Image (cartoon, rainbow, N blue to C red):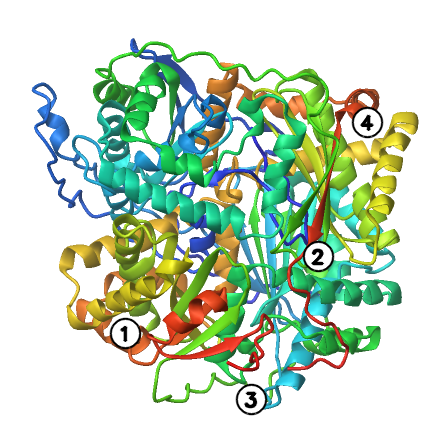
Amino acid sequence: MKSFSIRVALLALLSFTPQPTAQSQSFKVPFSQFSLENGLRVVLSEDHSAPVVAVAVYYDVGSRNEVKGRTGFAHLFEHMMFQGSENVQKAGHFKYIESNGGITNASTHADFTNYYQFLPSNQLDLALWLESDRMRSLKITMANLRNQKDAVKEEKRLSYDNQAYWPALLKMDEMVFRNWANAHPTIGSMKDLDAASVSDVSRFFATYYAPNNAVLVIAGDFDSANAEKLVRKYFGTIPRHKSPPPVDVSEPFQVASHTAEIEDAHAQMPALSIAWKIPARNSPDFYAIALLKSILCDGQSARLYQKLVKERAISLEVQGTLEERRGPGQVAVFTIRKPEAKNDDILAIIRDEIERIKSDGVTAGELEKVKNQYRLDQFQSGQEGEYTSLQTPLGKALALAEFTMFDGDPSLINTEIDRYLSVTVEQIRDVAKKYFVPANTAVLSVRASGVQPQLTPSQTR
Amino acid sequence: MRMIAQTSKSSMMVSKITSFRARSLVGIAVILFGYLAIAAGSVSAQKQRQPRAVETWRRQPPKPDAARPFNLPPVRRAKLENGLTFLLIEDHRSPIVTMLIGIPLAIEPTEDLASLTNQIAIAEATAELITEGAGARNAEQVARDVETLGGKLTTTANDDFAEVNVSVVAENAERMLDLVGDVLLRPTFPEEEVALYKRNRIQNVIVQRQDPSFLAGEQFDRVVYGKHPYAISAPTPSSIEQLDRNKLAEFHRSHFGVEKSVAVVVGDFEPGKLERKLREVFSQWKEPQKLAAASRAPAELSRESRRQVFLIDRPGSEQADFRIGTLAVRRSDPSYFPLLVANSILGAGTSSRLFMNIRERKGYAYDVYSSVGSLRFGGSFYGGAETRTEVTSRAINEMLAEFDRLHEVKVGPQELQNAKNYLNGLFSLSLSAQGGIAERMVQEYMLDLPQGYLESYRSKIQSVTAEQVQEVARKYMPTDRPVIVVVGDASKLASVLRTIGQVHVLDIEGKPVKGT
């Protein structure tokens, strides 16, 4: 083979620090941890490969902690955390971070709420100053609450009410979960958002936004000894609060309802969703369920993609979702159905595939395939894509915070993958038999009532 | 940890996360590149009330340490004998390898929109279908082999180039290259896959048009780009119907040429071995590059006597999704950098003027933003928001007032520097992931940027002046006759929008609705 290099150009040279050889098998995130007297758990993870640092604060509160009549409150409160504190003006958090070259965001889930910043490493102090100020002295005003209710209602319209299929996905939670703490939507209802008061905000802050209910993680380019000093300075004097009340997320085995139909005015193509209730994220069965779902749904060689989209051509797309929760969660198959196809045909194919796995198991090749996909996904599929995967200090900070808060064990960042990689063919067959049964199955049909455009071959623009 | 499952070729991401702000670094980073230095903590805190007696030190933001220099990773650039440029960037921080291959596409310019749409339908289908059968493998075998290697492989065509996007666990990078070679050089376009693609693509367009932001973008491009290929966001049913395997094979043979293409590999590989494999696989690429007969810039917009409002009727819409903007500049234009800085001041990030006004003061929207979309031959600028129907005209007027403020009042030095810091900061953050690095390197080649573009980017951002910001704002953020697109319920919006300009009511395919 003839080939030669014509030119070689080097860009700049310093500080990117590539190491000499490939080290595929030995990815390890180093970390250290300590706790403050007020109960704040802290994890530090140094990585000097680029002059950036991530600061994440997780609070042990989510929509599961809400009370009836106040759905959507945990998320509304998350917005209030950007409305100023004793020493930071309204929206000052954004301005300090962005004008210094960083990004910041937050998100609310059923079972936790997180806040993070990702910024140049010489600005670590700034991020700690901002996070500690709102943890100790959030400023809560009527005007800001009113403004953020408006913003959150627009968010609900934008991300849920005005999108095809999203109302159906929220409905699915009510069908799967019997416990209200699990079943109600994180985004809440307009009525409940309207009802939220300033005193609700103050009470929520006092109950949940305490150092003893939080985890702080710093990952990136910093010195651990110095960072510990800074953490003690900024967070050490924030008082411990009374422990928040425990939340009961237990679920009976059966789903709440087995079948339903929903009309979707924004959909022009019908859809079908099937869901099964599954155990908590760190339970032994969870990992086998995750791989089973991937064998069924993930990628174009997946069984259901091959059957529904390719072989039978009755679905336009197939998507598997695994909702990972600290308590019971769900796994679901969502498919956009071709209008000429029948729901029953799709359901029969899905059930057939699951029954085949119960009787014949999955193949060794399929298992190897999905395990390799999980190895890749660690570095690709974070909360917001590759920037929140384990490739970056931000992704490492988020993962360390989750494992610390949920499991009390940050070392799972390096070892949780082994739980996926050690799943056997037998375990997958066992979870198929145990969870993928009629009593635990919910089926939701989405009827498309959106305006259907005419499809004539002669149509041109 | 929570990994978000991704199914390729799905139009929807299902993850029940309620995020403070939807537009993340991932979205922004694609258009940004540049980093110089972080300015000292120059933002003043506003005192709100009496500080607690102890801890008065909290009243002022801390001073930053000295900034550590940020440097671009070393890049090995080389060419094969057949003309293919390749770039190798070692990154051993994560045990994966990411690869992007860019292939410039040449769409023949023509005044006939149907002919343009046909070409785009072929380009898109060719790029999508090269994975559906290649070499000795059928579609399922390609998918299974890619996935078994711990890889992902997607192929797409955008306005300027086709892109093969690959990631794989590190130890399988070389075996993955064999597969990439088959897909790129030896696609088979099986009859039955082409037939299925055609049926599904027609229905996929319907699914795309369920999404109001797709409709807004589609109509905006239609008006701004006129008869330029950039005007077309989706193929028509008839342009899909006319596809067949011969046309795709012919397009592949004539357009997927090698000399102007680029392969960028970033990740955890042993460079000598990987380069040998790259040379082995891609030396077989022989097709010459087809050059567009006369690639051209989009035509200037015709000067209407009044503001034109294009209202896409989406009955029952819960919100109005609007965009205001005009034709702007191609990526290689010197005005690109001033426009990027002006855009940042106006509407990038959560401390921009639009965000502070329309969301944080008025509460009209959850997300409000502005965007520079600069492509190889032309570009556009727009501001946009999604707002409840009853405040639509107020939100539009607030946005126009913010455009105006940039025309009338020169931006102050602090606000200018903040915007530059934000842009340069995003650059360094975006380089923390392999895909971010690869995307920027591909753009340098695909968008006709001068060599060294990346190295000089940060100084180009830094050198933007307040006068330049004002000049580009006056030119590309027009308030007299901008293009205004609104997607929403026309029965509630049409009359109020007439206070803003001449209203054209359109259906979701962009065709005029009779009687309006």
Q: How crowded is mark 3: few (under 14 residues within 10 Å), some or many (20 or more)?
A: few
Q: Do labels 2 and 3 share a chain?
A: no
Q: Which mark is residue A269?
A: 2
* Dot 1 and dot 4 residues touching (CB under 8 Å): no
**Picture coordinates of residue A13, whole percent (x, y):** 39, 49
How far apart are the alpha carbons under marks 2 and 1?
A: 43 Å
Disc 4 and disc 3 on one polypeptide chain: no
- Chain identifier of the residue bearing label 1 in the image: B
Q: Nearer the viewer, mark 2 or mark 3?
A: 2
Cβ atoms at labels 4 and 2 below 8 Å apart? no
| Amino acid type, residue under disc 4 in the picture | Pro
Question: In the image, what residue type sits under mark 3?
Answer: Ala
Q: Give the class, few, some or many, for how many residues have Cα within 10 Å of label 1's Cα (few <14, many ≥20).
A: many
Report the amino acid beneath label 2: Met
- Mark 4: which secondary structure? helix
Left or right, B10 with reference to B480: right
State if disc 3 and disc 2 touch (CB < 8 Å): no
Residue pointed to by mark 4 = A438
Q: What residue type is labelled 1?
A: Val
Residue A17, percent from left and from top? 43, 40
Neighbours of disc 4 within 10 Å: few (<14), some (14-19), many (20+): few
Disc 4 to disc 3: CB gap under 8 Å? no
**Nearer the camera: disc 2 or disc 1:** 2
Labels 4 and 2 within one chain: yes
- Residue B464 versus residue A336 in the image, above or below: below
Distance from the alpha carbon under mark 4 to that under mark 2: 27 Å
Mark 1 lies on residue: B472
Per the model, the C-alpha gap separating discs 4 and 3 is 63 Å
Q: In this rendered view, identify the residue nearer to me: B69 or A303.
A: A303
Give the distance between the C-alpha atoms of the residues marked 1 and 4, in whole angstroms. 63 Å
